[in-house]
Each structure stands twice: as structure tokens, then as C-alpha cells.
Image (cartoon, rainbow, N blue to C red):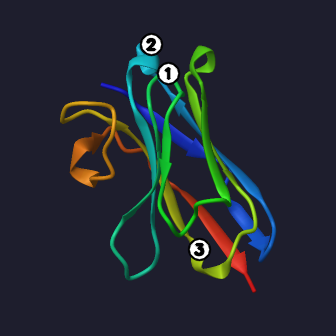
Amino acid sequence: QVQLVESGGGVVQAGGSLRLSCAASEFTFNSYTMGWFRQAPGKEREFVAVQSSSGGTTYYADSVKGRFTISRHNAKNTVYLQMNSLKPEDTAVYYCAAKVRGTGWFSVNLADFGSWGQGTQVTVSS
């Protein structure tokens, strides 16, 4: 089973940037679609971004499109989330996960993802 560890969160002012990293233990990392999700206080966990195993295809939530970029370095077993033009409403715990259920590369459904990391806190001050 893939084990994931997120890092890179912190406190940033509105308009600033952060880059999150997610390191995977599984040597077959490059066979997994990877996703980023977030959970704000009092809210349900929601989809942010997803990338195919090869890195060739990505998809974003409308709320982050044009501001966030998901990428991966398969040789380093790592997936990234570059977050620019951050807004206070981006404040949340961010999680990475591997797609472990369903067919095809694409999903935004939390139930299709597993091996969740512990999360990393992102706080955007106004």
C-alpha cells in the first residue's frame, strides 16, 4: 500500500504562494493517478486537483483553476501542488491521495482515493 507524507504548508498572506509536496513510499508510484484534496474547518473534504500517472493530464476544481498547478516527479516518487494568488478561502488542511479504485485515470470522487497522507495546514491571512 502506498504511504504518503505531505509537507510545505504554512501561513501566508493573501496573494502569496506556497508549494506543497507529497512523498510516496511505494516504488510503483508512477502507476497511480494522484490527487490533492482539502478540508476547511467545519466543511467536508473537497477535490482540488488530479493528475494522471504519466503526468500528461490534469484537472482542477473551478475554485483553484488558473492559480494552482499539480505536477509530479516520478523518479522522486513525489507529487506537488504549486499554489499562487492564495486567498483566505484557500485556508484548509491539504491532503494528497492515490487513486486506488475505479477504472480509468480520472476521478474527483474521494471514495476512489486511498492511502491518504496526514495532511498539511495552509493558512492564508487577509
The quarter of the image holding the C terminus is bottom right
Horizontal and vertical percent position of residue 109? 27, 53
> Against 67, is 125 above or below?
below
Alpha-carbon distance for marks 3 and 2? Answer: 32 Å
Q: Secondary structure at mark 2?
A: loop
Residue at 46% from the left image edge and 74% from the top image edge? 40
**Quarter-wise, where is residue 21 in the image?**
top right
Q: Under tag 1, what secondary structure?
A: loop
Q: State the residue at coordinates (65%, 80%).
A: 88
Q: Which residue carries the number 1 mark?
A: 54
Residue, disc 2: 27
The amino acid at mark 1 is Ser
Q: Quadrant of the N terminus?
A: top left
Tag count? 3
Q: State which quadrant residue 65 falls in.
A: bottom right
Compare residues 86 and 55 and report the one nearer the observer: 55
**87 shown above or below 3:** below
Q: Amino acid at mark 3?
A: Thr
Q: Earlier in the sequence, mark 3 or mark 2?
A: 2
Q: Secondary structure at mark 3?
A: loop
Decide if residue 19 is on the left or right side of residue 61. right
Label 2 neighbourhood size at 10 Å, few (<14), some (14-19), many (20+)?
Answer: few
Based on the displayed image, in which of its 4 quarters is residue 47 positioned?
A: bottom left
Can you identify the residue that label 3 sits on?
A: 91
**Image coordinates for residue 63, horizontal then vertical, percent:** 53, 69
